[in-house]
Image (spheres, helix red, strand yellow):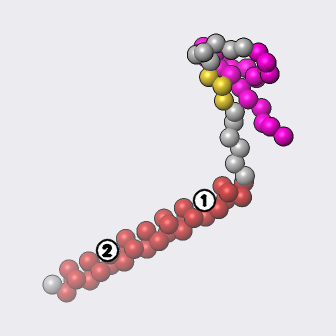
Amino acid sequence: MAGKAYVSINGDVTEVVKGKQYPKHALIFSPIEKSPKDYRKQKELAYEEVSSSIERMIEKISNKSITEYLI
């Protein structure tokens, strides 16, 4: 089953009519639908990357604080 397509002519957006001729400057597009599972997975991966980055940053700050304290 094909999704709906839309056409934008001078800023006015309407649904594409099959067989109708559109001007060369018309922009024809269709919405991109993402599965909620993909979004959830990407969100989890981003969270893991940020958490890991924060942990490394805290470790570097801790190590720097310890060495400064010892000096």
Identify the residue shown where x is 65% and y is 20%. 8
Give how far across and how far down residue 12 sits, in percent.
Answer: 66, 16
Give how far across and how far down residue 24 sits, in percent.
Answer: 60, 15
The CA span between labels 1 and 2 is 27 Å
Please state which amino acid type lies under the numbered disc 1: Lys
Disc 2 crowd rating (10 Å Cα; few below 14, some 14-19, many 20+) is few
Return the residue at label 2.
Answer: 61
Give how far across and how far down residue 36 sits, in percent.
Answer: 72, 54
Residue 23 drawn above or below residue 29: above
Q: Do the CB atoms of the residues marked 1 and 2 lie less than 8 Å apart?
A: no
Return the residue at label 1.
Answer: 43
Please state which amino acid type lies under the numbered disc 2: Ile
Q: Which residues are magenta?
A: 1-20
Q: Is residue 27 left or right of residue 17?
A: left
Identify the residue shown where x is 75% and y is 22%. 16
Q: How many marks on residues?
A: 2
